[in-house]
């Protein structure tokens, strides 16, 4: 079983920045893919960013260079640096990892961007 603990959400003004963290109970080297998803009220959950065990990254089209996903192996943590935040980025952000054939989700952290 893998446990994920997210942190870093909050309230920020448009144009501001936040860094989300997702700490894992096991080594990140056991994961195939780590990623961040988000879900706004009334909308489907969507991919924000992902990073593979090999370091390849993928971003949602709406990111447009504003967000960066990274990992810290010694800390077993993945980060999402979000810059130039917009009100439409308001959502609950979830961390997700895939290990072998299993997927694990965090509890979510709220990000609210005021205009």
Image (tube, rainbow, N blue to C red):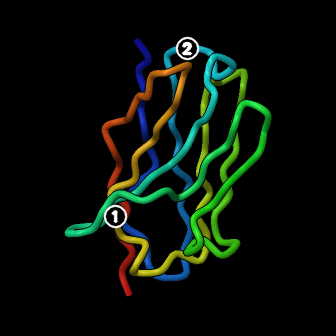
Picture layout, residue 54 above or below residue 65: above
Residue 2 placed where, x, y %? 44, 17
Other residues around mark 1 within 10 Å, as few (<14) / some (14–19) / many (≥20): many
Q: Residue at x 72, y 21 (%)?
A: 74
| Image marks 1 and 2: residues in contact by CB distance under 8 Å | no
Q: On the image, which quarter does residue 75 sit in?
A: top right
The label number, if any, that marks residue 4 in the structure image: none
Q: On the image, which quarter does residue 5 sit in?
A: top left
Left or right? Give the position of 15 relative to 37: right
* Residue that numbered label 1 is attached to: 91
Picture layout, residue 1 above or below residue 108: above
* Residue that numbered label 2 is attached to: 26
Q: Secondary structure at mark 2?
A: loop
Q: On the image, which quarter does residue 59 sit in?
A: bottom right
Q: Secondary structure at mark 1?
A: strand
Earlier-in-chain disc, 1 versus 2: 2
Along the viewing direction, whichever of 79 and 55 lies nearer the viewer: 55
Picture layout, residue 95 above or below residue 104: below
């Amino acid at each position: 079983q893998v446990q994920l603990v997210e942190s870093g959400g909050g309230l920020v003004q448009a144009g501001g920045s936040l860094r989300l963290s997702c700490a894992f109970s096991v080594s990140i080297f056991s994961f195939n893919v780590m990623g961040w998803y988000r879900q706004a009220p009334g909308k489907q959950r969507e991919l924000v960013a992902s990073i593979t065990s090999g370091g390849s990254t993928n971003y949602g089209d709406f990111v447009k260079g504003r967000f960066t996903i990274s990992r810290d192996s010694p800390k077993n943590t993945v980060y999402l640096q979000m810059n130039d935040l917009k009100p439409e980025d308001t959502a609950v952000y979830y961390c997700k990892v895939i290990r072998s054939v299993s997927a694990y989700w965090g509890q979510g952290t709220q990000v609210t961007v005021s205009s």
